Amino acid sequence: MSSTPAVGTALAPSSGHIIVLGNEKGGSGKSTSAMHIITGLLSRGATVGSIDVDSRQGSLSRYIENRRAFIERSGVPLNMPSHHLVPRSALDTVEAQRQDETARFMQSLMDLASNNAFVVVDCPGSDSYLSRIAHSYADTLLTPLNDSFIDFDILGRVDPETNKVTRPSFYGELVWESRKLKALRSRGQIDWVVMRNRMSTLDAHNKRRVGDAMTELEKRVGFRVMPGLCERVIYRELFLQGLTLFDYTHPQLQRNMTMSHVAARQELRELISGLNLPQAALAAAE
């Protein structure tokens, strides 16, 4: 069903900055990263909208539902994003489905972008028409990638003998098409950031090889690489309560932090800093 969307409607120049989390491979930590970006921006006083276009899994929506339930149960007044879930269309024909999905997504995007400094969009770990539309509206595209050649394969093909990248892969082509659509629509650009996620704390040989391959490919395809989140139990534990490590700065939730928690919070600060988000929007929030 997936194909290249139409150029589409340009957003108003005053619209909020759109951060899209995309990767056509599941299990890369998109929803966890999205929720921490949302709460990190909220903790700085920014207004944030969020859109979940992965209606089948709905991980970000469930995370936010868990957060809402925690607030009701505990009475702790945590900040919340304005959240929309955009479902896939159930209409009969492919063309009708595409028109319906485009209309639903654009209604959510225009509403949230006109009322918030930032909009965070979580895409499914697969190719879909909704995901392609979302990619084409990204100001910042963040691609979390598990630190292995299995996940690197969505970016480029690697020769097993030389460790050299032989050619870009299918997801890079999707981003290229999205960049063209955005340029035609508004002359805007997409800042594509690949985040090496769930990294081992050990300096393993495979870790260095993946890093070398990314360095080779980033100039050819046009992304920049930054370190992401290490594999930590705390990220999985917080999901059920809808919390993130940013929430532990709240007076009613402060707790003794282990060294692992302190390191994780620093990772998160570096994540948001590394996105190079518009300073004007962040300064206005603060």
Image (cartoon, helix red, strand yellow):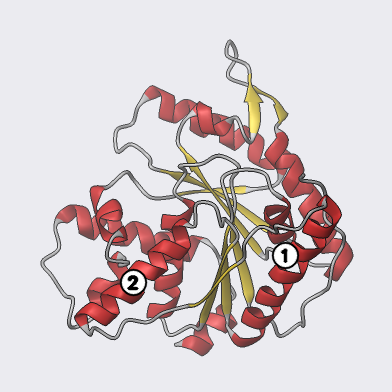
Q: CA distance from mark 1 to mark 2?
A: 27 Å
- Measuring from the top left, give residue 260's x and y in whole percent: 20, 52
Estimate the x, y position of residue 104 in percent, counting from the top left: 71, 70
Residue name at image x 51 percent, y 41 percent: 26
Residue 250 visible in image: yes
Q: Is residue 242 left or right of residue 213?
A: left
- Which of the 4 image quarters holds residue 103? bottom right
Amino acid at dot 2:
Arg
- Nearer the observer, disc 1 or disc 2? 2
Question: Callout 1: 10 Å neighbours few (<14), some, many (20+)?
Answer: many
Residue located beneath label 1 in the image: 137
**Quadrant of image for the C terminus:** bottom left
Position of 231 relative to 89 (above/below): above
- Specify whether 220 is left or right of 186: left
Q: Which mark is residue 67?
A: 2
Give the structural element (helix, strand or loop) at label 2.
Answer: helix
Q: Is residue 255 above or below residue 285?
A: above
In the image, what residue type sits under mark 1?
Answer: Tyr
Tally of numbered tags: 2
Taking the spot 32% from the left edge, 66% from the top edge, the residue there is 242
Q: Residues within 10 Å of mark 2 (few under 14, many from 20)?
A: many
